[in-house]
Structures are given as C-alpha cells and as structure tokens.
Image (cartoon, rainbow, N blue to C red):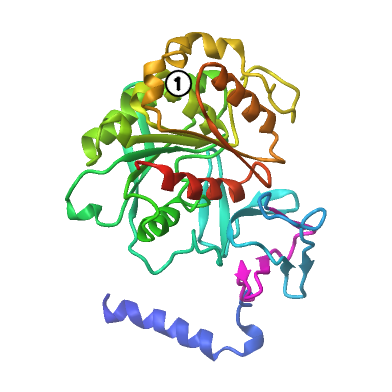
Amino acid sequence: MSSSRLRPMLALCFLAVALPAQQRPAQPPPVISPEVQADHKIVFRILAPKAEAVALQAGDILNQPKGGPQFVKGVNGVWEATFGPVDPGAYRYRFTVDGVAVVDPRNAAISESNTNVWSLVYVPGAEFMDPGKVPHGAVAAVHYYSTALGRYRRMHVYTPPGYELGKGKFPVFYLLHGAGDCDEAWTSVGRAGFILDNLIAAGKARPMVVVMPAGHTSAGFGASGMDEFGKDFVEDVMPYVEKNYRVRRGRGDRAIAGLSMGGMQTLNVAMAHLDKFAYVGVYSSGVFSMGPRRPGAAPAAAPPPDWEKPRLAMLDNAALKKGLKLLWFATGKDDFLLNTTKATIEMLKKHGFAPEYEESSGGHTWVNWRNYLNEFAPRLFR
C-alpha cells in the first residue's frame, strides 16, 4: 500500500484513540460461553440486550430444573445461567432468544445434524472418551458419488493411529447414526474417534477403520429413505471403502452397528446380506413399522410381518448363523423403544439366532450410545 493511502487511515486510528472516552464507540462486554467450571457446572452466556426472554435447549443434559436453567439478564445486556454439576460427556445445546433458536455465537464447537446445527460443550472427566495422551487416529469427511441416488454424498471415516504409514490392512466397522442426525454426529457428540483411540491404546480393541455414512437420503424420514439408504450402502459405500482404504474384505473382518434409526438400518442391511457381516450391533432400536402413528407415540413393539417375509432365506439359513460371531443389543430401561428391542430379539430367537442383550439405565440419548460403542468395539474382530 502506498504511503499516500496509508496516511489517512493512520490519522483516523490516531483520532479514535485521541477522542475522549465518552465520545468513543461503545464496546460490547466480553462474553465467555460456555464456561465449564472445575465442579462440572456449566455457565451459559449470550449477549442479547434487547431480548425479553432467553432459554436453553439441551435434551441430553440430565437433572435440569423444570423448564431448564433460568437465565438472568445483567445490566450489560448479557444473559447468564448456571446449572449442574453435569456428568462428563459431550452435550448439544442451543439458545432460544425470544422464541428463536440460535447457536451460541461465542462457541466455535458445533455438532451437525440432518437439517440444522447445534453448539457443543464437553465436560471432561470420563477417561474412555477424554482426549487422552495416547496416539490418535484421523477422521476425514469423504465425498463420493452415489450411483444409487445419482448425486454426491458424504461420509466420515476414522483411520486408526499408524494407518498413515501405509502398512497392512485393517478390519472395517460401519457405524450408523440415528434419525435427525448426519454422518458427522458420531465423531462430534458421539466422540467415536476418541473412544476408539483410547480403546486401541489400552489394547482393548483392535485397530480398525470406522466408516460413518449418512443415514438420511433426504430431509425427511420414511420407509423410502430406509430403502434408498440400503441401496446406497451396498452399491456405493462399501465398494468405495474397499477400493480406497486398506481394509480386509472377509466376513470376519466386517462389523456393522447403529443407533435408533441406524439400528433398524443395521438390521435391514445385515439380515439381507448376512454373508457379509460377522458382527452386528443394535443400540436403542429394533425392527419397527414406518407407518403413520399418533404424534409422540412410540412405534408398535411387534416387528411388522412384511419385514420378515423378504428376509426369510437369510433369517432361516443355519449355515450363515455359524459365521455370525456377535449379535448384540443394548437399550436403556427408560427408552421409548425398549419394547421394540425386546420384541425384535424374540423374533430373531424364533429364527434360531442367539442375540446378546444388555438393558442399561437411562433413555434414548447420546449418554447411552457412547457407552454402548465403548462396550461393543472391544468385542470386534477377536
């Protein structure tokens, strides 16, 4: 920049400094949010001087007072609420400012979902998902062209520590998200990368490639989307992974698991292609009808008959069962899909399967799903 152009700019800067304090533009107050305190309490703050009401949406944060934490507006226009202590973990949240949902403008940490984004706060103290002093793998956002759907799609892929050295092949674990979420969710709020890092470093899990595809094929959620996902998964996701990553291709080197919607998708794929998977995990889910139901009502517990019929050849194939090393279910006792899980297990037993089942505390939340991943991953590829 020439000196002739620079001089006026410098003059303006000096003028601003020279102005009396009462004539300078008012600076907004500093805002730190969220602030995780040593006692595991969280302070949320937002600058909204003209707002009349501020609230917090954070469904996974347990033990909240009724209506959530109460925000108080300071004289500087900063709204603040403190609550907890909160159990260690990752939590999504949003503010509602005069009824409008907004992310925390002072927090760069986010977690994506299918149609929106959340702010993210992490409370440390759970060793299995803390970013420990261990070798860390890498997580990549991978775009691929789906021939099944005729458009580009995205998935997230975790590669274990040492993969980048270019040596050896690894087993592959396909990990599916739930309804409303996207392929990014398992690595942000789900902490999958850190969980795998810690398990591998402790020798509790084998190094593996973890593939987290996008479960939704549109902004909605319906039976057609389930079918479209299965087609994309079999025709595009798996071939892409096996072409572009150093993964083994035997049945004993493939696992698949998912939560909620992803749990049903897991069953849809695995029970139609049981010759491809030796390990199957279903978190907070089962087989449920995609038909209309009363808003807020849980799906009918009994698996719909039209789910079994097209899969009978696989369900009743005794030879395929011999290669199935693990069929694992876990659901919280307060989960609205608990009865669906139990009914699905009974249906599979009727066809000669021997599923394992764990009933944990809690409900349909990431608090449970991270724990389920931490329990399931060490069982793989043994």
Residue 26 is at least partly visible in this image: yes
Q: Nearer the viewer, residue 163 or 54?
A: 163
Q: Where is residue 220 in the image (x, y as percent from the top left)?
A: 57, 28
In the rendered structure, which segment of residues is drawn in magenta? 29-57
130 up-or-down from 28: above or below: above
Q: Which of 247 and 97 is in front in this view?
A: 247
Q: Where is residue 328 in the image (x, y as percent from the top left)?
A: 51, 35
Q: Where is residue 261 in the image (x, y as percent from the top left)?
A: 55, 31
* Magenta-span inclusion, residue 190: no
> Looking at the picture, which amino acid does disc 1 mark?
Met
Query: Where does the C terminus fall, quadrant-wise?
Result: top left
223 up-or-down from 330: above or below: above
231 up-or-down from 107: above or below: above
Which residue is found at the position 31% from the left and 29% from the top? 251
* Magenta-span inclusion, residue 36: yes
Asked which secondary structure carries label 1, the reply is helix
Which residue is found at the position 52% from the left and 54% from the top? 110
Query: Where does the N terminus fall, quadrant-wise?
Result: bottom left
Which residue is found at the position 64% from the left and 76% from the top? 29
> Badge 1 is on which residue?
271
Q: Which quadrant of the figure has residue 356? A: top right
Residue found farthest to the right:
66
Q: Is residue 285 left or right of residue 334?
A: left
Q: Which of 350 and 212 is in front in this view?
A: 350
Residue 149 is at least partly visible in this image: no
